[in-house]
Image: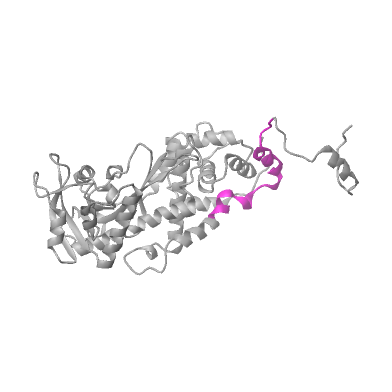
Amino acid sequence: MKLPQKDQDNLFEELLEELPPDLEELAKEFKVLVRSRKIKTPQELLRLVLLYCGLDQSLREVASTFTLLEERITDEAVRKRLLACEPWVKALLSKMLPRYTPENLPDGLRFIAFDGSSIQAPGATGTDYRLHIGIDLVSLEFTHLVVTDKYTGESLKQYPLGDGDVAVVDRGLCHANAILEIQKDGADVIARYHYASMPLYHDDEIAFDLVNWLKRGNATYQSHSVLGGALHKEKVNGYIIALRLSEKEARIARRRCRKEAARKGRATPSQKTLDLAGFILVFSTLSPHILSADILLELYKCRWQIELTIKRLKSLLDIDELRSKKGLAIVWLNGKLLYALMLEKRLRRRLGDHKWYLNHERFGTLWRPWKLLKQEIAPMITGVYFWCVENWPVALSVLFERPRCRKLQTLPKSVIKLLQFYPNLPVPNFN
C-alpha cells in the first residue's frame, strides 16, 4: 500500500555525510537490496539500522516510524531486513575507522590502548558476546572495534597491528604468545605486569627474582631487561619497569589485596603478592633508549582513557543492555558501534578535532557533548519533521499488538450502562 508523498528528508541526508562515500557500492557488494520491495535504497535500510540499534526502538516502533516516512511495513519485514544486512553493517563499521601508515605517524609510533568488555543477553548469568575496543591515546579516536562470541577471549591477537603500533594494555592481555605474534608484524607492547600471567627469566633456564631485584633497589623508577614466557617455550625479549609507591599508597594497595583474597575465600594473599603490591610494574618491548622508564609508566597511566570510553558507551548508549539473546544480537551490537562512530565523527567535525587530543591541556571530556549531540541527531534519524500526518492510521495498525485470544481490558458492561447518562459519551448497544 503506497502512502501519500512526503517532503524530502534533507536532515537525514546530512547525517549520512559521516558515513563512507561508497555506501551504495557496499550495499551492492553484500546484496542487501536484492529484493527491494519496501526498502528501496541503502539510505532507507540504514535508517532502520539506526532506529533499531542507535535509538533502541522496538521492531514495531521501527516499522511504524518507517510507515510514517515511506510506506507500510511490518515488524517481521523489518526483522528480516536487519538480519540480512549484518555483513553490510560490519563493513561500514570497518570503513569508518581511521587508516594509519608508519609514514604519517608522529615519530613513527602510534600508541593504542586496548580493552574488552563482556555483554550479557537478557536474563543471562554469564557472558554471551565480547567487545574488543582500541583507541588512539593521542587523538582518543576509535582505532579498532570488533564484536565476537563468548568463546573468543580477550587477546592482542584480536587486533590487526603493524609497524609503529604500540599496544598499551592491562595485565589481562600480558601474555607472551600474543606479544610474540604482534612483534612479527612490527608492533610493540606496554602492559601492566602480573607475575602469574608471564614468568620472567634471565635466560632460557634461570628465573628472574623479581622481588629480590625490587628490594635491592631504592630508586623511584627501576628497569631491567628480561625474557618473558613459560619455561622451555619461546620467550619474548623485553623490559620490566617498576615505580615504587609511597608508604601510604603501598598500604592501601596491600589492604586491597587482602580484601580481594577474602572475597575469593582465601585466608590471606601470598607474601609475594604483598611485596609486589608496593610497586606499579609494567612490561614493555620498547627499549629504554626509545622511551625511558618514567615516560613509559606515565604513558601507561593514560590507558585509563579507554576505561572512560567503555563507560561512555555503556552509560550513554546502553551498549551493555543487549536486547536479544540471539538472531539480531550481532546486528544490534555492530549497529550500536556504528551509531557511536557517527556521533563521534559529527562531534569532532562540529567542535574541532584537536580540542580532544591528549597532547595539550584540555577544557573538557567527550561525555556531555556526546549526550547533547544524541538529542540533536535523534529527530534526524526518526525523520519526525517529515512524517506524513495522513499515514497515522496505517502506522497505528503496524504499531499495535497482533490479534490475540485475550482481549484488551474494558469496563464491565454494568459500569458502562451506569455511564450512559454522561453527556456526549458513546454507549454501545448490548441488545
Left or right of 65 in this view: 21: left
Q: Residue at x 72, y 37 (%)?
A: 408
Coloring applied to the structure = one colour
Residue 358 in the image: above or below residue 116: below
User: Residue 372 location, x and y as percent?
Assistant: 51, 60
Left or right of 155 in this view: 345: right
- Residue 392 included in the magenta stretch of the image: yes
- 346 or 166, which lies in front? 166
- 375 or 174, which lies in front? 174
User: Residue 175 location, x and y as percent?
Assistant: 23, 45
Left or right of 71 in this view: 313: left
Q: Which span is picked out in magenta?
A: 377-404
The answer to which image quadrant residue 37 occupies is top right
User: Residue 115 location, x and y as percent?
Assistant: 34, 50
The answer to which image quadrant residue 362 occupies is bottom left
Q: Residue at x 22, y 46 (%)?
A: 179
- Residue 154 included in the magenta stretch of the image: no
User: Residue 137 location, x and y as percent?
Assistant: 32, 58
Q: Residue at x 31, y 65 (%)?
A: 359
| Whether residue 288 can be seen here | no
Q: Which is the main secondary structure of the residues drawn in magenta? A: helix
- In the orientation shown, which residue stands out farthest toward the top? 405
Quarter of the picture containing the C terminus is top right
Residue 396 in the image: above or below residue 12: above
- 327 or 62, which lies in front? 327
